[in-house]
Amino acid sequence: MKLSDFRADLSKAALHAGTSNRIRAFGRELEDALLMELERQRNTSASAKKIPQHPENRQMSYLASTFNVMIASPGDVASERAIVRDVVYEWNAVNASSRKIVLLPVGWETHSSPEMGATAQTIINRQVLSKCDLLVGVFWTRIGTATERHLSGTVEEIEEHILAGKPAMLYFSSQPVALDTVDMDQVQKLKAFKASCQSRGLFETYDSHGEFKNKFYRQLQLKVNEHPLFQATNVGGDEQAIVESRTQLPALSPEARILLKEASQDSGGTIIHARYLDDTVIQTNGKNLIPSNEHREVAKWEQALEELTSKDLVVDRGHKGEVFEITNLGYQVADMIVL
């Protein structure tokens, strides 16, 4: 029946019945119900006519095995901790889809929560370490704060992880350091621990942040490709090729490298570029890096600042070419630079 026919018949019935209020109210309710049903049918018909999205245009999901990567280190290797996270994220970007494996970087500072009733390290071991599959340990000049059972919390995490039969990758930095800035007691304890590791397996050393990144990127691939822990699911199938890191230390002039390194050590990460009548200044970390006002020297250092800006290592905050700030990428690259 058409809705118009229904209205006509309903009007006739209402008139025949004396147009009572009850019948009119009932008619309105029934008409509303019919309108809602017609709208529903119209929407259903329109949906059925939609052209399905081509499979190539869909965002495809996939099932993957997740492995937690514990980053264990004292407080003097913050840059290395950041590098470990970056390398893990880059491994995921390159390999996760094909291998059906996702690596999650884990640390006590991000994955633990306040709790009372036990020592801090015991709580960290239970909340964080016990849930990790792979451990990456990094040392430079410190061993860390001693615990009840081990030389430090970092050492305890490593020993407990190894005791559980899980893989651990250890790295020791050989980067130069000023002797008056280190605690010699910490250095001696670290040497003793390093010596004890020599008879228990293989560890790696590195001379710069750039070398550490390259070594860890390659060796992480070897570990995931070869260790039985990551082969248990057999999700990858074929043997995986080792690829080089896509993030490399950019080509920079000597002046640009010096400027970026100095800016990374400035408390605000700020570079000031000021021009006066008889002088030009490029200043950061309390230093004017232009040694003289000779035009050749000025041009050289202004070009260095332009290099850093063009590579997104520093950003012009005021958009006037006067105040620049180092970016997160700039800090990471500066950590890789050894002067």
Image (cartoon, grey):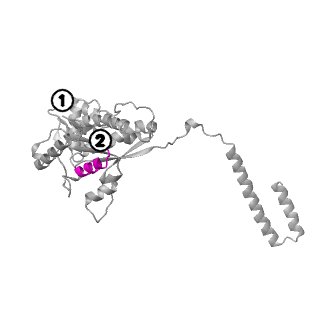
Quadrant in which residue 316 is drawn: top left
Drawn side of residue 236 relative to residue 2, left or right = left
Vertical arrangement, residue 7 with respect to residue 195, above or below: below
Mark sitting earlier along the chain (1/2):
2
Kindly identify the residue that appears in the image at 27 percent across and 51 percent down: 160
Q: Which residue is mark 1?
A: 297
> In x, y percent, where is residue 317?
31, 43
**SS for dot 2:** helix
Q: Which mark, by number, is residue 61?
A: none
> In x, y percent, where is residue 165?
31, 46
Residue flagged by tag 2: what amino acid is it? Ile
The prevailing secondary structure element of the residues shown in magenta is helix
Q: Nearer the viewer, residue 307 or 186?
A: 186
| Residue 258 magenta-highlighted | no
Kindly identify the residue that appears in the image at 19 percent across and 27 percent down: 296
Drawn side of residue 50 relative to residue 92, left or right = right
Q: What's drawn in magenta, residue-wise? A: 154-167
